[in-house]
Image: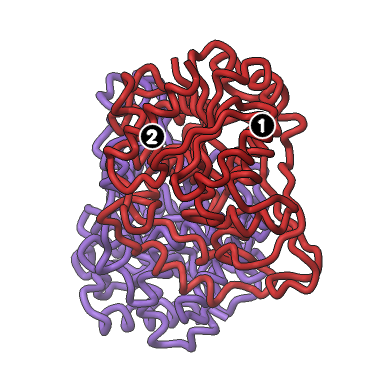
Chain colours: A red, B purple
Amino acid sequence: MIAVLAGGVGAARFLRGLMQVVPTNEITAIVNTGDDTVLHGLHISPDLDTVTYTLADAIDPERGWGLSDESWNAMSALNRYATNRPTNSQAAPTWFNLGDKDLATHFYRTARLAEGASLSEISQEIAHAWGLDLRLMPMSNDRVRTMITLQENCEAGKAGSEISFQEYFVKHRHGVATSSVRFDGADVARPEGLDVLNDAQSVIIAPSNPLVSIAPIRALHHVDAVLSARRNSVSAISPIVNGAALKGPADRLMIELGHEPSVVGVARLYSPICGTLIIDHADAHLATAVEDTGMRCIVTDTIMKTAQISAALAHTALGATL
Amino acid sequence: MIAVLAGGVGAARFLRGLMQVVPTNEITAIVNTGDDTVLHGLHISPDLDTVTYTLADAIDPERGWGLSDESWNAMSALNRYATNRPTNSQAAPTWFNLGDKDLATHFYRTARLAEGASLSEISQEIAHAWGLDLRLMPMSNDRVRTMITLQENCEAGKAGSEISFQEYFVKHRHGVATSSVRFDGADVARPEGLDVLNDAQSVIIAPSNPLVSIAPIRALHHVDAVLSARRNSVSAISPIVNGAALKGPADRLMIELGHEPSVVGVARLYSPICGTLIIDHADAHLATAVEDTGMRCIVTDTIMKTAQISAALAHTALGATL
């Protein structure tokens, strides 16, 4: 069994490559749910869905989230209520786009949760419904919420106010300055997949945001301890290439939260739990600095522009753990 | 103020006529919510929506429910989950069609309920969002569920089993034999609009199903007492014409539940609370039998094929209460 710690888009693309080099039913993805939110009464798990839709080749390739050939009629109709709601109401939020076809997934998840099924069971059922036979599990069946504190004098809210990850990421398009991140509920949430993290032949940390995609998983009890105990068979792919995130706010968050926005900054975060960091050719000059954090460093192509590159990257990540 | 006890389609058409003969802001519709259901985690109020959409000229005229120019992409996408769900799960029900645009209404209602707003407030907000200035209220802000017991040996379930109204009406297309109806929660639910029923210049019982649209309202505390105390200024329009319901299962239900499927059967149900029954020309020969129940009887056109007929019917119903 191969275990992968996963966020959204980058992890999904990496997993697609991994599926080409090992049998799918030998892969377990443990996915961040700190981004989960409830909108319109529906339970939404953005990272789980991005992984599922990507691996099922159903993702919209342009947006990187949601389904291809999507329609937006429910969202359009919501404007009527958004513009007429009472001033003290947040109902009918229109800043989080939900495609009509995508809604079916949230309907199913919400109904199954109401029936008493766990998010783990449901995530597996959804993956199966899309024809996938990897193990796909949330990092926890308990509620963990990634909360972002804004810097003072930020235009998005009053000074120092705390907002949910989706408000930060989608509503404000991660264009606001942050001062801290915390994972509400992580202290009491029970982690899923600890046995897999312990028993898997290899553990790979996908090229996801270390501070808001991987950190929520690491914030759960025992996860860092299990990984550090098997550190030599854990590898990670840096989501930072040439000082910048390929997608999303990883670089900006690294700076704002006091980390170097480079593969070296990533290495310092992962060094306690991970033996090998895989970095892009663009960062080859930083390989020694990565090794100075106590990690092995592998330089290769990490920008997954093609299925071939994704597969080669997965092969490299696997090889690093053997 | 004019108060109207209302179910779905028939009531909506009648209210559209009434809006032509009295100022809209003088109309209060008290609407059945025994049909309300929760699907996919969304709170659905079919009769309230049918009234709103009809009065806003947004209803699909062919179906009589839902919005015109509707798409069904969310429902179509739900099939994937319906066909893959565990055998013990009812998630992803596909028997209750929800159009994509219509979903926005359920999203708004569900989110506002979660914010602590009452169904009365929300119904009024939805009506305003559609440009309507009549008072539109649910019969109660508390949960009342119309439950249908099936006759023995019925193919739809095991003998004598009880199902919700929507299962009966939509899932089984009211094609199964019933033995009784009850309104779960009506004994503890607080009625809305009792003051209006007491103070209104006129009360009109719309041409809705007496046993499953009007009866839930009447099952609430004090409603029948308030109406019987002002019986002479209450009029009703028979939903049964020539022994048949214009739409829905009223005729069949009347027979199965022990009532005569005619205007006389309707008169016997309404006689305690209502001074006048308005029947169609097709039933003119039964006017004396209606009067024998202790009601006045007015014979006119009751089939609301045109806006003119609806308006004339509303005028007649109003006149009967003065």
User: Are dots 2 and 1 on a single chain?
Assistant: yes
Q: Nearer the viewer, residue A212 or B235?
A: A212
Q: Which residue sits at x=67%, y=57%? A: B115
For residue A156, above or below residue A102: below
Q: Nearer the viewer, residue B241 or B169?
A: B169
For residue A255, above or below residue B316: above
Q: Is residue B243 left or right of residue A33?
A: left
Residue B19, label in figure: none
Q: Which residue sits at x=57%, y=28%? A: A296
User: Residue A103: x and y, percent?
Assistant: 39, 49
Q: Is residue B277 visible?
A: no
Q: Which residue is mark 1?
A: A271
> In which chain is the residue bearing label 1?
A
- Residue lying farthest to the top in this orientation: A199
Work out how far the residue at label 2 is from the one at label 1, CA to CA, in angstroms.
20 Å
Classify 10 Å Cα crowding around label 2: few (below 14), some (14-19), many (20 and above).
many
Q: Is residue A252 visible?
A: yes
Q: Which residue sits at x=70%, y=34%? A: A219
Q: Are marks 2 and 1 in contact (CB under 8 Å)?
A: no
Q: Which residue sits at x=54%, y=56%? A: A244
Q: Mark 1: which secondary structure?
A: loop
Q: Mark 2: which secondary structure?
A: helix
Tag 1: amino acid: Ser
Q: Which residue is mark 2?
A: A313
User: Residue B132: x and y, percent?
Assistant: 48, 80
Q: Is residue B45 left or right of residue B160?
A: right
Is tag 2's residue or tag 1's residue first in the polypeptide sequence?
1
